[in-house]
């Protein structure tokens, strides 16, 4: 099923992605990917969620959490940035709608993934956290696109808050 989701993202990216200006938002794509890689690294022994293939095809392709995560970063995140930032409305109300729309898109795919057993939650994380995180994430992606330093500065207290609130033990870090 993860392969179907990724194929859908490829089709949506081909149809709706603004690839002509891709280099202008490439730094925001890297910011997005670095954030996920950082969480994967820091929380390696204390995951908040885990991806699973959940199908015989996924098992036969030896898909695991790492392969699925890297595939999502390469395909889903690239397409997301090409559409989300590439077609970002100029008005404040348009941006708010855009953030809510994309939070809904990610929420829908994550909800389906969870119901189908392709994603499991752990260590205090749950679907509600997914929605809140996506609202924050899409907001910070816009901020980063407009002002990269501010995007990084805003991210650190958010990460610190999540570590404290979710009671991530220091011993879980490598």
Image: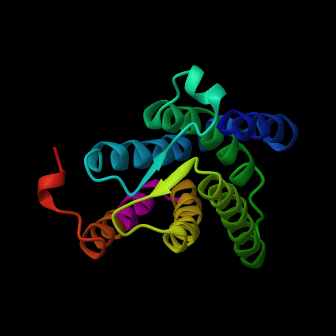
Q: Residue furthest right?
A: 15
- Could you say which quadrant of the image residue 157 lies in? bottom left
Which residue is at a point 71% across and 61% down the rendered structure image? 108
Taking the spot 71% from the left edge, 66% from the top edge, the residue there is 104
Instruction: Pick the residue in front: 82 or 118.
Output: 118
Q: Does 118 appear above or below 152?
A: above
Which residue is painted at 70% across and 75% down in the image?
96
> Where, quadrant-wise, is the N terminus in this rendering?
top right
Image quadrant in which the C terminus is located:
top left
Horizontal relation, residue 77 to residue 66: left or right? right
Provide residue 33's location: percent of width, then percent of height.
48, 42
User: Residue 2 falls in which quadrant of the image?
Assistant: top right
Q: How many marks?
A: 0
Report whether 142 appears left or right of 18: left
Q: Is residue 173 left or right of residue 40?
A: left
Report the front residue among 82 and 42.
42
Where is residue 45 shown, x and y percent of the image? 25, 47
How would you classify the magenta stretch by its main secondary structure? helix
The answer to which quarter of the image holds residue 66 is top left
Residue 42 horizontal side relative to residue 125, left or right = left
Its colouring scheme is: rainbow
Does the magenta run of residues contain 119? no
What residue occupies the far front of the structure in this picture?
A: 56
Residue 27 rendering spot, x and y as whole percentages: 52, 42
Magenta span includes 150: yes
Q: Which portion, as a residue range, is magenta? A: 147-155
Percent coordinates x, y for residue 92 in the rendering: 71, 76
């Amino acid at each position: 099923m993860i392969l179907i989701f990724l194929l859908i993202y490829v089709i949506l990216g081909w149809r709706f992605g603004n690839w002509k200006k891709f280099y202008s938002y490439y730094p925001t794509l890297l910011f997005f990917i670095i954030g996920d890689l950082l969480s994967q690294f820091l929380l390696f022994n204390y995951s908040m969620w885990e991806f699973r293939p959940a199908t015989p095809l996924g098992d036969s392709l030896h898909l695991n959490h790492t392969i699925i995560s890297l595939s999502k970063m390469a395909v889903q995140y690239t397409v997301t940035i090409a559409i989300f930032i590439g077609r970002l409305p100029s008005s404040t109300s348009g941006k708010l709608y855009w953030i809510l729309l994309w939070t809904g898109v990610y929420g829908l795919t994550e909800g389906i993934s969870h119901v189908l057993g392709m994603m499991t939650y752990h260590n205090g994380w749950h679907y509600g956290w997914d929605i809140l995180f996506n609202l924050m994430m899409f907001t910070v992606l816009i901020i980063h696109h407009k002002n990269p330093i501010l995007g990084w500065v805003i991210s650190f207290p958010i990460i610190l808050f999540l570590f404290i609130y979710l009671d991530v033990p220091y011993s879980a870090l490598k």
